[in-house]
Image (cartoon, helix red, strand yellow):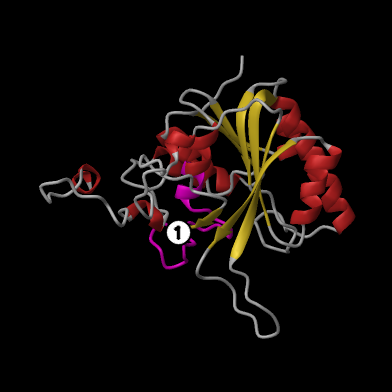
Amino acid sequence: MIAFDKLICGDAIVELSKLPNQCIDLIVADPPYNLGKDYGNNHDLKAWNEYETFTRTWLKEAIRILKPTGSIYVFMGVRFISKLFLIMESELELNFNGWITWHYTQGMGRKTGFSPRHEDILYFTKSEEYTFDLEAVRIPQKYYRERNNMAGANPGDVWEFSHIHYSNPEREQHPTQKPEAILERIIKASSHENEVVLDPFVGSGTTCRVAKILKRHWLGIDVNPDYIAMSQRRVDEVFDGFDSIDPRTERKPKDLPQDRSGQKSLFEARG
């Protein structure tokens, strides 16, 4: 019997290999991008062939433990994203379901090229039958149209969330902390309450924190004991709102109709 709702300090590949087949509903992975970042007790810098081998190995274990109806989302930087796509689709034969672009307004500056303002998230499923709950992640429509579903629109595959900036009080001592609202959308869309969400590179603990808030079971793995402690603290903190939002969630549809008396429409009144 697997004990869920816990953090594990150890190498991701080793710890994933200990889990039984087909026990996880959703995997959200933010592996090192091999760009030389300092993660405390390890340095993210391998020869590229070594990094490819590492990627194939942890992905094979991830696929083994993923349920047939499960999904996997992998964050990745631009230098490896194309190779990662080919590994997941062509080599490992996963079912491609989306290439999500996370757009942010702040990033590193460059003088000899265009400054990066996005990261990518590859979204694959283990089969053609999988969980996707659109109703849980709809955003308000921009305009009223009779043909539009006024319960809300599909958020699309370009997501705008600000970085958790270093001046933000929610910022942790981790170089690649992700906004909680990104994980909220992923977890709501691709899992149900009481299902199991796994993050094999848990880092600052965002995935596990959000999974707990959304009433999912969770597992997090990281090789750095300081990050495990950080993640446990975040999981245990009282929830008083996510540290980020999609700005579109606050909009109200334009061109809302009025009834014959000239009163505001039901849609506008609810707003």
Q: Would residue 59 appear left or right of 218 to someone viewing this image?
A: right
Asked if residue 165 is among those painted magenta in the image, a careful observer would answer: yes
- Work out whether residue 56 or residue 68 is closer to the camera in this orientation and state it: 68
Q: Position of residue 146 (x, y in %)?
A: 36, 44
What residue is pinned by disc 1?
A: 171
Q: Residue at x 84, y 41 (%)?
A: 90
The stretch in magenta equals 162-184
Q: Position of residue 192 (x, y in %)?
A: 49, 26
From this view, report whether residue 244 is shown above or below residue 65: below
Residue 87 occupies which quadrant of the picture? top right
> Magenta segment, principal secondary structure?
loop
Q: Residue furthest bottom?
A: 111
User: Which residue: 79% across, 41% down?
Assistant: 89
- Quarter of the picture containing the N terminus is top right
- Residue 18 appears in the picture as rendered: no
Local crowd at mark 1 within 10 Å, few (<14), some, or many (≥20)?
some
Above or below for 114 versus 52: below
The image quadrant that residue 244 belongs to is bottom left
**Residue 63, magenta (yes or no):** no
Q: Position of residue 50 (x, y in %)?
A: 87, 52
- Comparing 12 with 28, the one in front is 28
Seen from the viewer's position, the closer of residues 190 and 254 is 254
Coordinates of residue 18 in the picture (x, y in percent): 73, 25
Residue at 48% from the left image edge and 36% from the top image edge: 134
Residue displayed at 47% across by 66% down:
166
**Residue 145 located left or right of residue 40:** left
Q: SS class of the residue under badge 1?
A: loop
**Which amino acid, by three-letter code, is at mark 1?**
Arg
Regarding residue 27, the answer to whether it shows in the image is yes
Q: Is residue 11 left or right of residue 238?
A: right
